[in-house]
Image: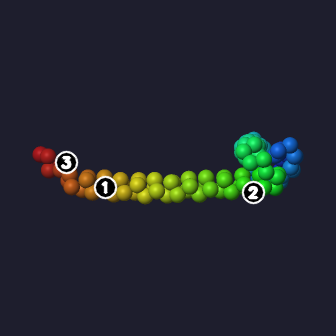
Amino acid sequence: MEKHRVVITLRGIDYVLRTDRSEEQTVRIATFLDRRMRDMAKMTHASEEMVSVLTSLTICEELMRMEAENTEMHREIDMLKKQLREAEARMELPKDDELE
């Protein structure tokens, strides 16, 4: 996919990005990040650099927690599938020709 320029604004500063994402998706991501950075700035009253670092760390922590939850859910799904297969095998439903 061809890269194009998209202008985003974070904390009042415009940044020009070259990306293959759609402008809509890029702006949506930037809007999310800008909101999180503004929230962090209000909570901490830290410097712009520290707000960027703290916001990045917070988002990374959330991502890692969600990845762990996702992995656990996949394990549970796999376990339930195995239990279902075992239950189906125990049931051993008769085949069509055995019903006559």
Residue beneath disc 1? 83
Q: Is 61 or 26 nearer to us in this picture? A: 61
Q: For the residue marked with disc 2, what is the amino acid? A: Val
| Label 2 to label 1: alpha-carbon separation | 45 Å
Residue beneath disc 3? 96
Most extreme residue toward the left, as rendered?
100
At 87% from the left edge and 50% from the top edge, which residue is drawn?
A: 16
Instruction: Give the foreground label among 1 and 3.
Output: 1
Residue beneath disc 2? 53
Q: Position of residue 84 (x, y in %)?
A: 31, 52
On the question of residue 37 being in view, the answer is: no
At 86% from the left edge and 43% from the top edge, which residue is drawn?
A: 12
Q: For the residue marked with disc 3, what is the amino acid? A: Asp
Quadrant (top left/top right/bottom left/bottom right) for the C terminus:
top left
Q: For the residue marked with disc 1, what is the amino acid? A: Gln
Q: Is 3 or 61 nearer to us in this picture? A: 61
